[in-house]
Amino acid sequence: MNEQQLPKNIAKLQERVRRAAEKSQNGNSAVQIIAVSKTRSAQEIRAAHACGLTHFGESYLQEALQKVSDLDDLPLTWHFIGPIQSNKTAGIAPHFDWVHSIDRAKIAQRLNDQRPPELAPLQVCLQVNISGEDSKSGVSLEDLPQLARTVCELPHLKLRGLMGIPAAGADTLQLHQDFGQLRTALAELQTLAPDIDTLSMGMSGDMEPAIMEGATMVRVGTAIFGPRNR
Ligand SMILES: *Cc1c(COP(=O)(O)O)cnc(C)c1O
């Protein structure tokens, strides 16, 4: 995209986030923007960093590792947000700061075992299937407490909270219900792990209801970088 557009998009986004945060269940507290840079070049990420963004989210491991390496001169925080197959954990564990998409114990165990012990623990969110669709990834609300207990026992992972993606095409009412359900689930888990604090929810098209329902992190691609080709 035209790089003149990037600062404008980012300013507009920050304003959207600020306005929604005023109406938030969290009482207008800060919302962290994660710039979703999947399919974007290292150069585009540099330009976004020059506009003040420092947190970047990636879904496709191979291209992500190349960018993490190309940009290691910048003080960036990297978030892995895509589906995780077992053969991806060895690449994710040493090169990311956060993982938002843990949905089963096996993946958590592998990330823990492969996290280099000299690094800070990997900050993790559990991805919850809030839409209730069988095809979507994410742990069910029913199985969530058990998975959370498992992750809390792993020394190289630090459980921070929950991530969720509503069903495509959900209307505003449904979005509020889905995001609200995630907020309730986090509150319940806080009885088990009082220091968890993160709700990763909201994207370009649904960040307002997500923030109003208490999102602490939004994952935003299109509203920053424009439409993706894939
Ligand atoms: C691609 C992606 C996003 C960003 O979506 P936009 O609609 O471009 O803002 C957020 N979260 C996840 C998990 C994604 O895969």
Image (tube, helix red, strand yellow):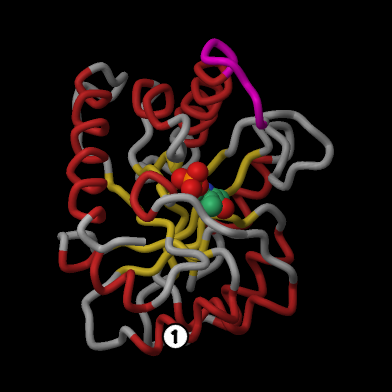
Q: Is residue 171 magenta?
A: yes
Q: Which amino acid does label 1 sit on?
A: Pro
Q: Which picture quadrant has residue 117?
A: bottom left
> Residue furthest toward the top?
173
Q: Name the residue under label 1.
A: 117
Instruction: Name the spot of residue 57 as percent of width and height, x first.
Output: 43, 61
Marker count (numbered): 1
Q: Residue at x 79, y 32 (%)?
A: 133
**First to last magenta residue range:** 168-174
On screen, residue 69 above or below 106: below
Instruction: Name the spot of residue 199 as percent of width and height, x first.
Output: 42, 39
Q: Out of 3 and 130, give the one closest to the viewer.
A: 3
Residue behind label 1 places its C-beta within 8 angstroms of ligand 1: no
> In which quadrant will I find the N terminus?
bottom left
Instruction: Name the spot of residue 94 as percent of width and height, x first.
Output: 48, 83
On screen, residue 4 above or below 177: below
